[in-house]
Amino acid sequence: MPRKSAPGKSNRPDGGVPDRETILRFIAEHPSRASKRDIAKAFAVRGHDRVVLKTILRDLEDEGLLTRRRKQLIRPGALPPVTVLDITSRDDDGALIGRPAEWPDDGTVAPAVLIRQPVHRKGKSRTPAAGVGDRVLARISASNEKAGPAHTAKIMKVLDRQRGTVLGVFRETPGGGGRMEPVERRDKEVIIDPEFVGKAKDGDLVEVDPNRGGPHGMPRGKVLSVVGSVASEKAISMIAIHAHGIPYKFPAAVLAEAEKAKPVTLGKREDWRKLPLITIDPADAKDHDDAVFAEPDDNPANAGGVVAYVAIADVAHYVRSGSALDREALKRGNSVYFPDRVVPMLPERISNDLCSLKEGVDRPALAVRMVFSAEGRKISHTFHRIMMKSFARLSYPQAQAAIDGAPDDKTAPLLKDILQPLWQAYAALSRGRERRQPLELDIPERKLRLNEDGRVDTVVIPERLDAHRLIEEFMIQANVAAAETLEQKRQPLVFRVHDTPSLAKQEALRDFLKTLDIPLAKGGHLRANSFNGILAKVRGKPHETMVGEMVLRTQSQANYSPENIGHFGLNLMKYAHFTSPIRRYADLIVHRALIGSLGLGEGAITPEEEAALEEISAEISTFERRAMAAERETVDRLIAHHLADQVGDDFEGRVSGVTKAGLFVSLQQFGADGFIPVSTLGLDYYIYDEAHQALVGEKSGKGYRLGDSVEVRLAEAIPLAGALRFEMLSEGRKLAAATRSFHKAKRGASRSNGARKRKRRGY
């Protein structure tokens, strides 16, 4: 009997190469197994036909019909096989509809997903029940329905149930009581009866329980807590915490477990307490999870070489898999840092006490000893479970000042034997970094300084010191060593991965660079140093900032994955997060994996964890983006509040974004972005030139381009939204003739096409 072909396979006896449409359909229907190898296997493609298949797939990528996510080929806009979804609504049939909890800020709309919840006999179902407002981890597949969402999902785990409280601003009403204006648009206004107002005053940000029914669909509620005045910094950070569903209160069981933890004794650990490891952190740091030391290598075969030590707090000793501490840490994914507070991943008893590498105090750690050549090539490394005692706690400016010739009373005794060897090791590692050529995008980071009232005092961009770069490079090398060791041991782990820029983004950058006569090679095999070459060509030139912004926008989002595809930005093939287990769950998983694979004692990764690494990676990647969004929105709201009393003032700014709707302008002194609607730019008709990243006046030929320095007036500031609106004061500049002719041609073509369509339709 003839062999039946598998779904999607060619019926030809020798397999053969499927056509383009068949390949695209297969990838859409099998998103979790659509690598080149999977496709060849599914269609029985053998021998020389594999070369033909590879060519077809490359053509589909070049045309933007496919994109590559790790080794998988996917349709643009498709979702990964395991995704965190927020359930937002129900369809007409009552089925749940969800959307990805985090979605790239690239102008595209997050796709809707139909969530199937099968009901089994006798009400038994292995699928967790969920409802609107819940956040779930789901397995995604393509929909076979012609109408409705293109994806369906099966819930694997409910991550967060719908919050029973809402956050809003309390407004008093005559005669007592009041109403709550919700911060989130999706929430309803709530009536607060006088007996349920509590201590709330007009203008306070309050947390309300809206569960009490009211007439005409208007809910009534009770004030549970007063966060503070809506004008205060504390309240503003609380808005982001609530809006993103960030857990900020530790359950009693978690706190109890943390309080029961005891300091570690030496036991079977290696005793490194006499090794002068030191911590170098921000001056205001409350936890210290990494310590470093370096010395010349005394091996004659490695002349000029160095030995670098990195010790990391042994969080895995205290936070065991499956414990209350562990479950809560996974629920948070990472610590979240706001200007006025930190929402930690672990309780302070663990993060700021038992796992903080305090000066002069015995602390357990997981350490790596790395040997480098004089040129920064890593020769070997070994991991150790140790007991250490931090020799000194230094700040970045303090350590840098000592190296620069201005030591203080604390750093002077450390200069010769500790600090100078550290900088000699950094010099060797820097030579290795120069050879490796990672992406050198040095984006300044704004930092808000608050006054005693918790309001913004100043906005500063801290100086980037060699002390920062030293710690960064030591940590990178420790992370590489962790990934290499675990891969060698064939131990499943969570990698930190960064994919190459998508072909669509590469093409957009290529079109933009053409306008500056800067070439960008075609093909899907760009390296980080390709972008470094571009940045070098514009360094010190007027459009340096503009090009840097475009290169940044071209990059993919880094995330966590059990599948290793390397780290494009760092130009590393093996990379895992190992150095911050106090504040990142991914690092805790890597610690457990090292402990288990190297036989370093208790606290190893469990088989259950290994089996769930795909789900864990999806969760913590989502939580990381959640934290980044909350931090960014809080800073935006604070700066908008800071500038609210400066409406009408003029500022120097720079065009940081160009869209059809208008211009985004950044105020460098504040790190704030505001918007100028295109309708307010003037009487001319402005056309959006995507290739040149410009808005060009059709009649005048004058316009504004990404990176232009402009003068603007603050027209409006909305603190709760973190929004600023500007008026343009600078006159547009004459743009290149090529830009204007491009738009005239495009405008003319548009009119011609419109005429042809009207003629065909009989208008």
Image (cartoon, grey):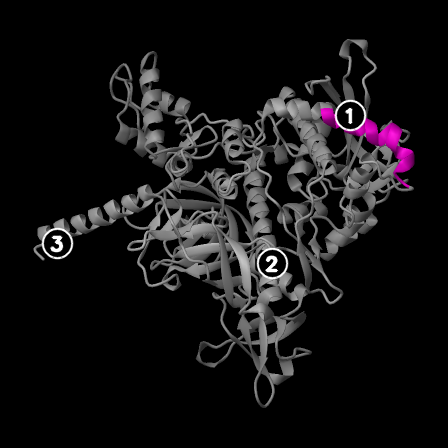
> Does residue 486 appear in the picture of this structure?
no
Please check the rendered image and state whether residue 679 is part of the magenta-colored stretch, yes or no: no
Label 2 Cα neighbours within 10 Å, binned few <14 / some 14-19 / many ≥20: many
Q: Where residue 163 sits: x, y (%)?
A: 57, 62
Q: Where residue 383 sits: x, y (%)?
A: 75, 25
User: Which segment is the magenta one?
Assistant: 410-427
Kind of residue at badge 3: Arg
The answer to which quarter of the image holds residue 466 is top right
- Determine the secondary structure under disc 1: helix
Give yes or no for contact between labels 1 and 2 (Cβ–Cβ under 8 Å): no
Mark on residue 634?
A: 2
Residue marked by disc 1: 424
Q: Nearer the viewer, residue 552 or 91?
A: 552
Q: Magenta-highlighted stretch: main secondary structure?
A: helix
Residue marked by disc 3: 758
Q: Residue at x 31, y 18 (%)?
A: 52
Q: Earlier in the sequence, mark 3 or mark 1?
A: 1
Label 1 Cα neighbours within 10 Å, binned few <14 / some 14-19 / many ≥20: some
Kind of residue at badge 1: Gln
Mark 1 vs mark 2: give the one in front.
1
Determine the residue located farthest toward the top in the rendered image: 301
Q: Is residue 585 above or below residue 575?
A: below
| Quadrant of the snapshot with the N terminus | top left
